[in-house]
Image: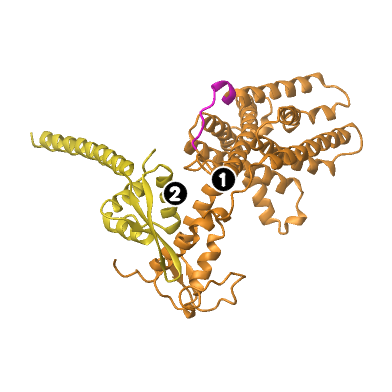
Amino acid sequence: MSAPAAGAGSRLSPATAGEEGRTSLRVSGAGSRVSLLERRYRAVLRLLPASYRAEREEEMVDAFMEMSGDVSDELNPRPAWGEIASVLALAVRLRFGGTGADPRLFAWGESVRLLALLGLAFHAMGGVYTGVELLRTLVFQVQPGLAGAPGSFERLLAVAVSLAYLCSTVAFLAIMRGHVRTAKITAVVGAAPALAYTLIPMILAGPVMDRPLSEPATLVFTAVPVIALLLGFHGDAAPRRRSWALALSPLAAGLAVLGCTWLLVALRLPDADWLYLWLDLGTAIPVWAAGAVAVLTRRSAPPQALAMSAAGLLLLLMRLTLLGNLPDGPAWLTVCAQCALLWSLSVALAWVGARGLPARRPAFQP
Amino acid sequence: MNMTEPMFLALTALVDEPRHGYGIVQEVDRLSAGRVQLKIGTLYGVLDRLSAAGLVALDREEAQQGRLRRYYRLTDEGAAALRDEAARMAATAETATARLRARTAGGAA
């Protein structure tokens, strides 16, 4: 065995740090004090599930400290970013368990993966009708204001944004057919315009509290499914290839919503503003509610209940932002009814899902 | 199981003798001439997958400066999987070499 490569796993910085946070001191060896680097590495290991730490922490610390060698506390050593990143990646794979994982962690992993599918399904639907509307504008000049004048920068931007939104549709198709890498790349591209439109004003306009609530709500609504996709579908989670019918269903739904919107506009019904609240996001609410009732009555697996609950809360977040902007009347009552439906079913789903989760594995298995 | 390069190198590191965590890191570093430097989190992810597939097994445990040190050994299944993967890689390398040879011969003609 060769000598340890001193400092290989640590980054040394000037001794400026104050007292470390609460870390349990272990006596290692004959009364020797635990080093600062070891305490900091153990703090990083807290990212891992407790059951895993109980089995692996000591040997991981042993390997890390042997790799780092003796580093004086005066040098204020810290685990290198690469080491922290490797523990973080391991934590993600363990906490969102894949094939062969602890049943409880696998259930959480499945919940996150299902949430990604539900969220991406909605964004796929949006991608379709954004794309179709742009195509209609470009070909038939239906709404010239929507895409700017031919050859203008506005037109270029509109086309780029629509194509980016269409990437969400590609992402959903890809993940449903088992192509994880393609799904991840296109999902990030698909979320980019919405994130840019919400983040840039929030950053430029100063305090978040001064911005309309719809901006952070849109940010969360857009980002959560993408983050769930990135975290949930890791190397240990074998992607399931689902049928084309299921993969194409949001596209059909998107076209149906578009048809209903055109019909509603063509009919020019008086005082029919509240009807528009059942389109786009509003269409997702009754569909989600029907699914929620099915999950609750069929006593489905906990991951389905938890994922549906989280999806319901995301829809609720988006709907709540409308309440302050609507005058009293049918439209306001419609949003209230939608919020009540979303809240009551989401809570019921969360309760059923949490109760059905497999028991925690004992923290220590001799 | 799709065998990644860190998995392949970790199995190779255990061929001659059982090793503990940092011993595997060092041996992988040697085997790859410094190209693959396993982080500790990555190493234990690899060991988890190899253990779950029955390719490595716990050999023994020791106490080292008050800390637990576990040694891992290659199982018969692990040796077979490593042999298969090595043969596959050798065949691919041979194909590439043969094509390069043909290209050189074609260029000389």
The chain coloured orange carries which letter? A
Q: How is the image coloured?
A: by chain
Position of residue A296 measured from the top left corner of the image (x, y, whole percent) = 74, 31
Q: Is residue B32 magenta?
A: no
Quadrant in the picture for the N terminus of chain A: bottom left
Mark linked to residue B94: none
Q: Residues within 10 Å of mark 2 (few under 14, many from 20)?
A: few
**Which chain contains the residue that carries disc 2?**
B
Q: Is residue A245 magenta?
A: yes
Q: Nearer the viewer, residue A147 or A35?
A: A35
Position of residue A124 measured from the top left corner of the image (x, y, whole percent) = 61, 31
Where A160 sits versus A248, above or below? below
The chain coloured yellow carries which letter? B
Picture residue at 85% right of the left edge, 37% below the top: A336
Position of residue A269 measured from the top left corner of the image (x, y, whole percent) = 85, 22
Question: Which image quadrant is residue B109 in?
Answer: top left
Name the residue that disc number 2 marks. Answer: B48
Picture residue at 66% right of the left edge, 24% below the top: A253
User: Where does the magenta region start and end?
Assistant: A238-247
Q: Nearer the viewer, residue A224 or B75?
A: B75
Local SS, label 1 = loop
Q: CA distance from mark 1 to mark 2?
A: 15 Å
Q: Are marks 1 and 2 in contact (CB under 8 Å)?
A: no
Position of residue A93 measured from the top left corner of the image (x, y, whole percent) = 52, 47
In this view, the residue farthest toward the left is B109
Name the residue that disc number 1 marks. Answer: A96
**Which chain contains the residue that carries disc 1?**
A
Q: Considering the whole magenta stretch, tell me its main secondary structure.
A: loop
What amino acid type is highlighted by mark number 2? Answer: Asp
Q: Nearer the viewer, residue A167 or A179?
A: A179
Q: Is residue B21 left or right of residue B27?
A: right
Q: Is residue A167 left or right of residue B59?
A: right
